[in-house]
Image (tube, grey):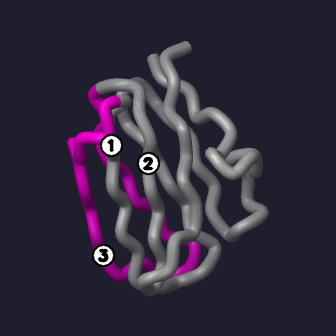
Amino acid sequence: AFNVSSAIDGVAADEADGMNAYTVNKTLFLEFAEGGAYEVSVYNMSGMLVGRDARSINAGEMMHISIGQAGVVSVVKDGKELRNIKIVNK
């Protein structure tokens, strides 16, 4: 199982930036308070891109992406980095 750790910048994985993140089994769920064009990239601990999803999201909508291993998830909204989230094994 995986756990959403605090963001790399030290901000907890809460709704402070309009996004809530949590995991269920090997899937990361992201809930967005604001609509926009989001790009989510998943990197393994070696920095290799292992997954990516990009789409237009409406306010309150969720995105889910499979995570096969611990690593880092980068979330970009409208071309600007929103948050980097560390995913760790628990």
Residue receiving disc 2: 73
Residue 38 drawn at (x, y percent): 41, 74
Residue at the spot x=40%, y=83% of the render? 37
Residue at the spot x=32%, y=40% of the render? 47
66 versus 25 height, above or below: below
11 versus 70 height, above or below: below
> As shown in the figure, which amino acid type bears the numbered disc 3?
Arg
Determine whether label 1 and label 2 are within 8 Å by CB.
yes
**How far apart in space, not on screen, are marks 1 and 3 (Cα)?**
18 Å
Residue receiving disc 3: 55
Name the one closer to the observer, 73 or 61. 73
- Element marked by disc 3: strand
Residue 21 drawn at (x, y percent): 58, 48
In this picture, which residue range is highlighted in magenta? 46-68
Q: Nearer the viewer, mark 2 or mark 3?
A: 2
Name the one closer to the observer, 13 or 20. 13
In this image, 57 relative to 14: left or right?
Answer: left
Earlier along the polypeptide chain: callout 1 or callout 3? 1
- Image quarter for residue 41? bottom left
Residue receiving disc 1: 43
Q: Number of marks in the image?
A: 3
Earlier along the polypeptide chain: callout 2 or callout 3? 3
Q: Nearer the viewer, mark 1 or mark 3?
A: 1
In this image, 59 relative to 13: left or right?
Answer: left
58 versus 14 height, above or below: below
**How far apart in space, not on screen, are marks 2 and 3 (Cα)?**
16 Å
- Element marked by disc 1: strand
> As shown in the figure, which amino acid type bears the numbered disc 1?
Tyr
Q: Circle 1: is it few (<14), some (14-19), or many (20+) Cα within 10 Å?
A: many
Residue at the spot x=63%, y=33% of the render? 5
Earlier along the polypeptide chain: callout 1 or callout 2? 1
